Every structure is written in C-alpha cells, then in structure tokens.
Amino acid sequence: MARIHAEGIHYAFGRQKVLRGVDLASADGECIALYGANGSGKSTLLTILATGYRPQRGSYRLDGLLASEEGSELRRRLVYVGHHTHLYGHLTPVENLRFFCDLRGLRPTTEALREAVAAVGLALHAERPVRGFSAGMRKRLALSRILPAKPALLLLDEPYSALDHAGVSWLNDLLGGYLRGGGTIILASHDPERVAPLSPQIRRLEEGRLIAEQTTAPRETP
C-alpha cells in the first residue's frame, strides 16, 4: 500500500475550479516536489493533504487512514509547515515546541526539546521570545517540529523562502536525514535547484491536474 494515496481530488473556490481530479501516490522515503504557476493549486493541494480543506470530490488516505473519516488520527501523523509558521511570539522556542507537542499528546522531556532547538541552529536563542526572531529563524523553529513529532508525512509550502545559502544547505541535510529514516515529503517550490539534492519525484500542476515529469537521480545513502 502506498503511504499516501489521493484519488480524484477536486476543489473549487466558488466558480473557480482549482483542482480537477488530482491523483497522487507516494511511498516511504520519497520526496515529491510540486511545481506550477502562482494560483495553480499547489498550496490548496497541500492544505487538503494537511486536512485543512476537505476535497469536494475524491478521497485521500495516509497509511490507510481515510481523511474524511479518520482525520484526527491522520493529522497526528503529519507536520505541515506553510507560509504561516503558527508560532507564538511571547513564547520561547522550547515553549513553542512544548505547546505543539501537547496538542498532539506527545510528552518529550525538556532536554529533548532543547536538543531539537539546538539541532536547527537556535541553541543560543532558546530562552528568547520568538517575537524578536527573523523570518529565517522562525522557519527553522517551525521545521524543528519534525524532530519530536517524527511524522510519517511532512508537507512544506515554499520551505526555502527566508533562508540564505547556509540555511538552504542545512535544510536539505535535515530533510535528507528525514527521508533516509523512511519519512515522506511533499513540498511546493519555485526553485528546482534548491530542491534537487533531495532527488524528488517531479509533479507539475497545470489546469488543475498533476503532470509527472522527469525523476532526478537517486539520493546517495551512507
């Protein structure tokens, strides 16, 4: 069984049809990169996969869980990082991670949360309120959620935005390790060169449908 199986997904905003019968499947350890023009439906599709929108037609399963019937359990198996990081400015990085974990019923130790913050390069800022963080620092902290959560699926909308060259390299190292551990990534991006180290399966959204393109070379495994 595919880890993700979406079939015949339709979605419209009023009379504007955005997705017209999208089919998508992926396996463990696979990265799928979504490309397409602005307004092509990439963010809408990611939001559906995160169960933020319910498709008007079609079905979606993650690890066999049907989104329309088992949405709560399905959401516990994924992490979605979009344009809004959903961080609380008055909380520190560790406190933000603790709040995120509490919502999922996770009980990591404070030391484990500190290690997650350090792993994304924010150890020196662990006790600072997030309100003073740059956009790149906020992106790093949002991505640190995958460390305590260990999700089956990671959904990313323009993950390289607000990151400098060093940040891009760091992110690809983080995501590469996640993939080698068997996680699945679906991301939307405008920058194929930055995504290339992840050796993604390429899908392009055009006129509401997904079109498969070339597959890049396989990742090297240690």
Image (spheres, rainbow, N blue to C red):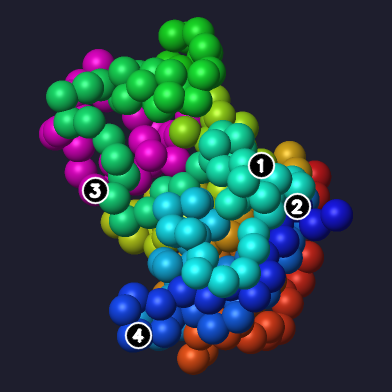
Rendering coords of residue 100 (x, y %): 40, 27
Rendering coords of residue 93 (x, y %): 31, 25
Question: Does residue 117 belong to the magenta stretch?
Answer: no
Q: Quadrant of the N terminus?
A: bottom right
Asked whether the residues under the numbered discs 1 and 3 touch, taking CB atoms below 8 Å apart as contact, a structural biologist would say: no
- Residue annotated with mark 1: 152
Q: Quadrant of the C terminus?
A: top right
Q: CA distance from mark 4 to mark 2?
A: 30 Å
Label 4 or label 2, whichever comes before in sequence order: 2
- Residue annotated with mark 3: 135
Q: Residue at x 22, y 31 (%)?
A: 88
Q: Residue at x 49, y 51 (%)?
A: 51
Question: Does residue 141 belong to the magenta stretch?
Answer: yes
Q: Residue at x 51, y 19 (%)?
A: 105
Query: Of the numbered discs in the image, which one, if any, rests on residue 79?
Result: none
Q: Secondary structure at mark 2?
A: loop
Q: Secondary structure at mark 3?
A: helix
| Closer to viewer: mark 1 or mark 3 | 1
Q: CA distance from mark 4 to mark 3?
A: 32 Å
Label 1 or label 3, whichever comes before in sequence order: 3
| Closer to viewer: mark 3 or mark 2 | 2
Q: Secondary structure at mark 1?
A: loop
